[in-house]
C-alpha cells in the first residue's frame, strides 16, 4: 500500500480499494460509489468505483468528473448516517444537467459506507 499523502496528490494512478484500505487503517471513515448500470452513452462502465474518505478526499471515478461532486457529497452523508443510496443521473433529470451529465446517457451509482 502507498503512503496516504501520496494518495491525496496522485489520485489518477491509484486503486480505490487500496486507498480505502489505507484510509481505514489510518482511522478514517470510507464510502464507495460504484457504477451499477448505464444506459446509452455513459462516461464510465459498470463496475467503475470511487472511494471517498471522511474529509472529502477521493480516489477513482464514476463519471470522468461530471457527477463526482454529487457522488462525493452523498458518500459523505452515507458515512454519517450509515445508509446506502442508489443515485441515478441522466439528461432527462434536471440534476444531471446541473452536475454536468450531458453525454446523452444515464448512469446509476450505488453508494455504500464501509463499516
Image (cartoon, grey):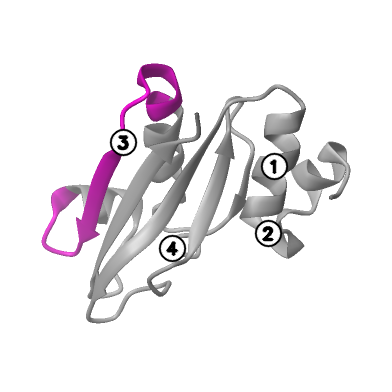
- Report the residue at 22% width, 54% height from top: 88
Q: Position of residue 41 (x, y in %)?
A: 29, 80
- Report the residue at 85% width, 46% height from top: 6
Q: Is residue 37 left or right of residue 64?
A: left
In contact (CB < 8 Å): disc 2 and disc 3: no
The mark nearer the N terminus, 4 or 2, is 2
Residue 84 magenta: yes
Q: Is residue 87 left or right of residue 94?
A: right
In contact (CB < 8 Å): disc 4 and disc 1: no
Q: Secondary structure at mark 4?
A: loop
Q: Which residues are magenta?
A: 77-94
- Tag 1 residue: 21
- Tag 2 residue: 15
Query: What is the crowding at mark 4: few (fewer than 14 residues within 10 Å), some, or many (at least 20)?
Result: many
Q: Secondary structure at mark 1?
A: helix
The mark nearer the N terminus, 4 or 3, is 4
Disc number lying in front (2 or 1): 1
Mark linked to residue 63: 4
The mark nearer the N terminus, 4 or 1, is 1
State the separation of the CA atoms marked 3 and 1: 19 Å
In contact (CB < 8 Å): disc 3 and disc 1: no
Q: How many marks?
A: 4
Mark linked to residue 84: 3
Q: Secondary structure at mark 3?
A: loop
Q: Position of residue 98 (x, y in %)?
A: 27, 48
Amino acid at each position: 500500500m502507498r503512503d496516504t499523502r501520496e494518495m491525496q496528490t496522485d489520485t489518477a494512478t491509484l486503486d480505490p480499494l487500496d486507498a480505502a484500505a489505507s484510509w481505514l487503517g489510518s482511522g478514517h471513515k470510507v464510502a464507495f460509489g460504484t457504477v451499477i448500470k448505464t444506459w446509452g452513452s455513459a462516461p464510465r462502465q459498470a463496475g467503475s468505483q470511487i472511494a471517498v474518505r471522511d474529509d472529502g478526499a477521493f480516489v477513482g471515478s464514476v463519471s470522468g468528473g461530471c457527477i463526482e461532486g454529487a457522488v462525493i457529497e452523498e458518500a459523505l452523508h452515507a458515512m454519517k448516517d450509515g445508509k446506502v443510496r442508489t443515485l441515478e443521473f441522466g439528461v432527462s433529470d434536471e440534476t444531471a444537467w446541473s452536475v454536468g451529465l450531458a453525454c446523452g446517457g444515464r448512469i446509476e451509482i450505488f453508494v455504500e459506507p464501509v463499516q
